[in-house]
Image (spheres, rainbow, N blue to C red):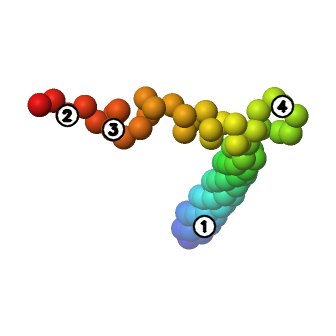
């Protein structure tokens, strides 16, 4: 009878250990996902801020950049489409 009580308590103890190990694994996974999300959020936010244009007084403006792009005839659809006859 003494060996049956020890075996039953041992099974409950090991079940509790594995349950706690699973809980700790879930907590670590949640922290990892939160850290990855935070990192991607910061990277996306900084990329969005950096893509809005050059700061004032940097030597160029969006209008100058657009006029440079529009004046280049090499990028027109007719120049890019070479149809051989």
User: In this rendering, is residue 10 above or below 74?
Assistant: below
SS type, badge 2: loop
Disc 4 from disc 3: Cα separation: 34 Å
Coordinates of residue 54 in the picture (x, y in percent): 77, 38
Residue drawn where x is 62% and y is 38% of the image? 67
Left/right of residue 38 with respect to residue 85 in the rendered view: right
SS type, badge 1: helix
Coordinates of residue 72 in the picture (x, y in percent): 51, 31
**Mark in front: 4 vs 3:** 3
What residue is disc 1 on?
12
Disc 4 from disc 2: Cα separation: 41 Å
* Residue 68 in view in this figure: yes
What residue is disc 2 on?
83
What residue is disc 4 on?
58
Q: Nearer the viewer, residue 61 or 21?
A: 61
Q: Residues within 10 Å of mark 2 (few under 14, many from 20)?
A: few
User: In this rendering, is residue 55 above or below 18?
Assistant: above
Left/right of residue 34 with respect to residue 10 in the rendered view: right
Q: Residues within 10 Å of mark 4 (few under 14, many from 20)?
A: few
Of callouts 1 and 4, the N-terminal one: 1
Disc 3 from disc 2: Cα separation: 9 Å
Left/right of residue 74 with respect to residue 50 in the rendered view: left
In terms of image quadrants, where is residue 12? bottom right
């Amino acid at each position: 009878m003494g060996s049956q009580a020890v075996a039953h308590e041992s099974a409950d103890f090991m079940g509790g250990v594995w349950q706690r190990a699973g809980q700790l694994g879930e907590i670590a996974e949640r922290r990892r996902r939160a850290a990855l999300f935070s990192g991607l959020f910061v990277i996306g936010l900084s990329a969005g801020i950096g893509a809005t244009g050059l700061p004032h007084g940097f030597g160029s403006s969006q209008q100058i950049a657009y006029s440079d792009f529009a004046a280049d005839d090499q990028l027109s659809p007719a120049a890019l489409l070479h149809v051989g006859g």
